[in-house]
Image: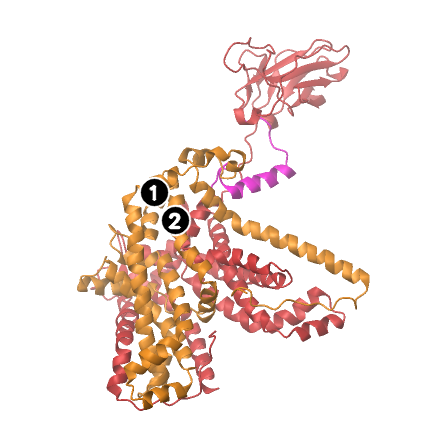
Amino acid sequence: MSTVSTRATRKGVVRTRPLVAAAFLLPALALLGALVVYPIGYSVHRSFFDASGNGFVGFDNYHEVFSDERIRTALKNNVVWVVVAPGLATALGLVFAVLTERVRWGTAFKLVVFMPMAISMLAAGIIFRLVYEQDPDRGVANAVWVGVHDTFAASAPYPGAHPRPDGGLAADPDGAFTTTSALRAGSPAPVPLVAVKPRYAKGERDAQPPRAEPGKVTGTVWLDFTRGGGGTPGRVDPGEKALSGVKVEAVRDGRTVASATTGADGTFTLPAAADGARLRLPAANFAERYRGAEWLGPTLVTPSIIGAYIWMWAGFAMVLIAAGLAGVPRELLEAARVDGANEWQVFRRVTVPLLAPVLGVVVITLVINVLKIFDLVYIIAPGSSLPDANVLALQLYQSSFGTAVNQGLGSAIAVLLLVLVLPVVIVNIRRIRKEGRR
Amino acid sequence: MTALDATPRVTAVRGRRPWPARLAARLGGGAVRLVLVAVGLFWLMPTVGLLLSSLRDRSDIASSGWWQVFAHPGQLTGASYDTLFHNDKVMHSLLTTTLITVPATVLVILVGAFAGYAFAWLEFPGRDWWFMGVVGLLVVPVQVALIPVAKLFNALGIFESTPGVVLFHTAFGLPFAIFLLRNFFAEIPRELLEAARLDGAGELRMFLRVVLPLGGPAIASLGIFQFLWVWNDMLVGLIFADSGNPPITVALQQQVRQFGDNVDILASGAFLSMVVPLAVFFAFQRQFVSGVMAGAVK
């Protein structure tokens, strides 16, 4: 992907003594030789020796790479990375590149999406540690996720709340609470609850004492707690908060005969059928709230880190594809439209095939990049799920440096990484040679 | 016109199509805008979250999300940055990062330009084979070199030192530098070099007076690319830098394991470490993009 093409076999401008050419090349070749080429040979050699470096072990280290539990997790994760990340990033980049073409402020959009490429994986890692914070009150991912979840599945209004010990209600084994005495039509039932977390009672109105209604069972569910002390337990004192949205049921002989939900002032009204039954507050009122997904837990940690990676690299795909798109002849697209193709058909049958070479370069680049992924995993995965997020480059680092190291094993992983990128080296050299012959 | 704005706009042939199609196109256009705005905000959100978190108190970060500052602007405070600026280790690490990045960038340009010039214009046996060898090194993962170079540097006495990190980054930046510069230098018109030669210039003078000045754009791309690459590196610094005097990425990494306790320093430090690359990115977008495109295989 060079922006400049190479010229056909050129002669040097003027014949020069080989010594002069050598002088120009020496610094580069010395550095490359000592720090890139020699290490390749050394790593291959070292990978056949044990941890101490003295005992020849043949292919044992390679055998260990494919049998050790931790390294197999790393291999498996690398496969997931290679299969998912480059494809997703490229697909997003393609969509963004095509869509921004039609918008006047497309450049601003591209700038926003491309920007993460300029920052370090460490900074991106810290950014996403904050995003994936488990507590939905702190981590934006779970805040959104819980919000969506609660929109579709009603959540318990007052987790952890319970009646006063002397409040006339007894706990059932399943977490519900039932009154110890039967309900009577015309005589109101007070249902005082305590231990409601302040943030759940926020925004509640003042509770209304239950009014007697002939032929009906009425009552109030409220937070029997006066801020700053005072108040009488079991009585609705001024300023005590109502608990709205609590489901109440009238149960007789194990059957629910009527049910209602408390209003904004905490009151509820049950029909006459409830007379003589007992009042039950189902456990669903007090269940713990949905706390969102465990993004950085053992099962989700790799997909979560891949998400952060895509945030960083979709912009790369987008910019390269947009440059390729600029080279697509407009007439072809227009011709397809005139022939009656809709936008999707134009995209699928004309744009994408024309972009195939660019898409190929983008995917290959991302595959190489993903094979070596290290920083993001190391920073985002908390210590407890680091083994589940393991990748080859991370395993290599841990096997080679720090405590209890086995550099023979580390070298074997390094050689494996090199072998995995080798096909790309060959493709590269072929392309350069072809360009050279042109 | 910026570098990111490389695509010509679609000018649909309007008027010819019947009105339902035009209406659909307009509605579709509205939907596209809506989607792009939503995606743009989505992409910005993580960074905004970091910035706002860095501007809140540690106790606020521990108890609620950064979006609460929209409801309580009073929470905004520079306390985290104050803590950060008084943290000598992190502050010093910024200097270390600079002392690694600037030499590694200058060296790669210098060494790469010498070699690129030789590959483009000097005659020597096996030139194209040598060049192909260099191109083959483009995608060699740095991981392959970690153990051997650590041993080598140990023997040379530069393991865990800034010069070692600089050398490592220079070496691994070279294949790309040589590839990019050689291709660019090869495009310089032969006549310019021949004229200089007739004036009696030697190889060194032709290189300094003709090739280097004309290679400006490619050198700029390479410089920006290498600068960001080295500034943002963590792995090489983790192994080869002096752990008592590490670059910023490593200094912050050392605090990550106690994420909750250090969240104030981590958020403000991460943002501070982003300021330089972001400034470079916004100032030199064009060069950065062409560098990225040229190095798509790195």
Q: Look at the numbered discs 2 and 1 and tell me whether their residues touch, using CB distance below 8 Å.
A: yes
Q: Is residue B102 magenta?
A: no
As drawn, A100 above or below B38: below
**Residue beneath label 1, please?**
B84
Q: Earlier in the sequence, mark 2 or mark 1?
A: 1
**Residue beneath label 2, please?**
B272
Identify the chain drawn in red.
A
Whole-percent x and y of residue A166? 54, 11
Q: From this viewpoint, is residue A313 visible?
A: yes
Would you say A79 lies left or right of A219 here? left
Q: Which residues are magenta?
A: A132-160
Whole-percent x and y of residue B85? 32, 43
Asked whether A194 or A68 is in front, the reply is: A194
Residue displayed at 70% across by 65% down: A343
In the rendered picture, chain B carries what hue?
A: orange
Regarding mark 1 in the picture, which secondary structure is present there?
A: helix
Asked whether B11 or A321 is in front, the reply is: B11
Q: Chain of mark 2?
A: B
Residue displayed at 39% across by 75% down: B215
Residue displayed at 73% across by 56% down: B27
Q: Amino acid at mark 2?
A: Leu
